[in-house]
Image (cartoon, coloured by chain):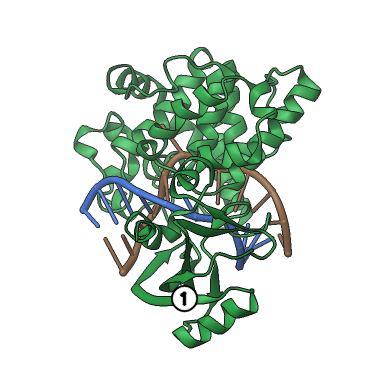
Chain colours: A green, B blue, C brown
Amino acid sequence: MNKNNLASQIPEWQERLTLVPAPLLAWYDKSARVLPWRSNPVPYHVWVSEIMLQQTRVEAVKPYFDRFLSALPTIESLAGASEEQILKLWEGLGYYNRVRNLKKAAIQVVERYSGQLPADFEALCSLPGIGVYTAGAIASIAFGLPVPAVDGNVLRVASRVLCSREDISKEAVKKAMAQALAAILPKDRVGDFNQALMELGAMVCLPGAAPRCESCPLAAICEGHRQSVAEELPVKAAKKPPKAEEKTVVLLLAEGKVALRKRPDTGLLAGLWELPNWEGHLSPEALQECLGDCGINVVRISQMPDARHVFTHRIWEMRGYAVYCESSPLPEGWVWVTLSELREGYALPGAFSAFAKQLPKLTSL
DNA sequence: AAATCGGGGGC
DNA sequence: GCCCCAGATTT
């Protein structure tokens, strides 16, 4: 489909979408999940929940949401929090730039808006970490503003209802869907309507071959269902496979402590801590050489089982060694920590957990 | 437009 | 294994 055909489809889409709000809201009223961020949708809470929920399932967010707000109950407290604290609160949730941007935005909200999130779509969009979707979600859910919130769920539901084979990974298609949805928003319940579309996508209109059309409130008006092609939708460009990287990871141990290293503040896992590691699969002899270059005298080396960690766009194939060494000064950016200090104050990404989980045994020897 | 940026749950 | 998730930002 070229651009003109896409634009010409919007009126047709709007016509079918007009049938959506009534049955969808009735279904939402009776079937919506009870979620922590729905009980008291003040703007700050909605904001935090939406950032946590970016590319992240509801079940994964639940353990983090209340803990985060208990530690940082106001936008002012978030603005004044240390990077160490916010990364520890985000540890394991992934996409760590989300929380770094959240803090940056909190500082801007304090400085520019007296600590109150602005009830304005464009102003929200200008804050770090808030894009078109998140601005729409906050605007509609927290402030009742008539703005669509088009996420992956909504694109899937809409593609099926409309039986659209447009590629939803294209920005132009997202914009066209948003435009069509903007025209049919029920003005008195925009927040509920946006959440209901997402809820339907998460609970009923499931991805791939799993849609539960038999229990869908939109089955009667869904063109994809009528044509029995819902499972083929939405159309989405294929993504390229992740690239494998070999690494050698070290549990460096001395006097009951383990060495950690601070990662750079840009790039993958920015600002988090890590176990010292080198590119490639090193032999014990080669590793001892690397450690010697760091001023570390090895006492004993033992190999651990290999581990693998899959990111979205790369794979770490990790060889692991436990290395006992003479207690010694560490290079710049490295620290000796006890196990309890690691647990309480240092954000260590899950990529290292296969090795880090051995620490209780190893540090007691 | 494509690449980067995590981690996990469900099948 | 594979898919993809209440996406945003950088290149």
Three-letter amino acid code of the residue under disc 1: Val
Q: Is residue A22 left or right of residue A263?
A: left
- Asked whether A189 or A352 is in front, the reply is A352
Q: Residue at x 34, y 61 (%)?
A: A365
- Can residue A183 be seen from the camera position used here? no
Q: Residue at x 27, y 35 (%)?
A: A219
- What residue is disc 1 on? A299
For image coordinates 59% across by 30% down, the residue present is: A136
Q: Nearer the viewer, residue A315 or A170?
A: A315
Asked whether, in this view, residue A364 is left or right of residue A298, the answer is left
Quadrant of res A63: top left
Could you tell me which secondary element the residue under label 1 belongs to?
Answer: strand
Asked whether the viewer can see residue A86, the reply is: yes
Give the quarter of the image for residue C2. Answer: bottom left
The image position of residue A272, as x and y in percent, is 58, 52
Rendering coords of residue A214 (x, y %): 19, 36
Q: In this rendering, is residue A252 above or below A89?
A: below
The x and y percentages for residue C4 are: 40, 51
How dense is the environment of label 1, judged by Cα within 10 Å: few (below 14), some, or many (20 and up)? few
The image shows residue A350 at horizontal and vertical percentages of 43, 54
Residue sitting at the far right: A112
Image quadrant where one finds the N terminus of chain A: bottom right
Taking A147 as reference, is A160 left or right?
Answer: left
Q: Is residue A105 above or below residue A29?
A: below
Number of marks in the rendered image: 1
Chain letter for mark 1, please: A
View extreme (top): residue: A188
